[in-house]
Amino acid sequence: MTSPNNKKGIIVSVLAIALVLGGLIWFSRGSGRNNRQENLNSSGGGKLSAEESTFDFGTVSMSAGKVSHTFKIKNDGTELAIITKLYTSCMCTSAELMVGGKRLGPFGMPGHGFIPSINQTVNAGESAEILVTFDPAAHGPAGVGPTNRTVYIEQKSGAEMRLEISTIVTP
């Protein structure tokens, strides 16, 4: 049988343990909020813009071979931008990302190969380049005439940038 003094001691001990555990939980929740806030600040919310978003190659002959154009992009935001994916609208077009001395790609059309997540950062104020290459002979003789293709740049923030190329393909 337990004496009343022992019951009081047990109750006080249980309350003390509950207070200590409650305090630990409280403090760990507070630091978790700070960590989440830091993650939000580095979530890739930068703002990418392009000097030009369209380029016309003019008339291109299949027999002349591939043509390329470099689009210049910049992170105009105050946070870093995280490019998660880069892909094109057609197998005849490929894109490469050049940033910070690195060259990633070439990347093509989904369904014609695996499009990996690249998770490449572009710091605030930093510039990058997208090299777009178009192969006018990719579709064979049926591919003559006006052509429009798109390069998609997906960001971790959910933003998407599109770069467009156009040409008139001749034999």
Image (cartoon, grey):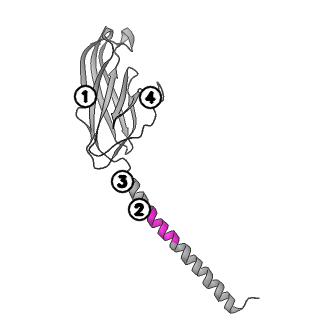
Query: Which residue corresponds to mark 1?
Result: 54
Q: CA distance from mark 2 to mark 3?
A: 11 Å
Q: Amino acid at mark 2?
A: Asn
Q: CA distance from mark 3 to mark 4?
A: 30 Å
Query: Which residue corresponds to mark 2?
Result: 34
Q: Say which residue appears at 40% left-offset and 29% top-offset.
A: 105
* Residue 119 picture quarter: top left
Q: Residue furthest front?
A: 101
Residue 109 lies within the magenta run: no
Cβ atoms under marks 4 and 1 closer than 8 Å: no
Crowdedness near tag 4: few (<14), some (14–19) or many (≥20) residues, C-alpha within 10 Å = some
Query: Which residue corresponds to mark 3?
Result: 41
Which sits earlier in the primary sequence, circle 1 or circle 3? 3
Crowdedness near tag 2: few (<14), some (14–19) or many (≥20) residues, C-alpha within 10 Å = few
Q: Which mark is residue 110?
A: 4
Task: Identify the element where label 2 is drawn.
Answer: helix
Q: CA distance from mark 1 to mark 3?
A: 31 Å
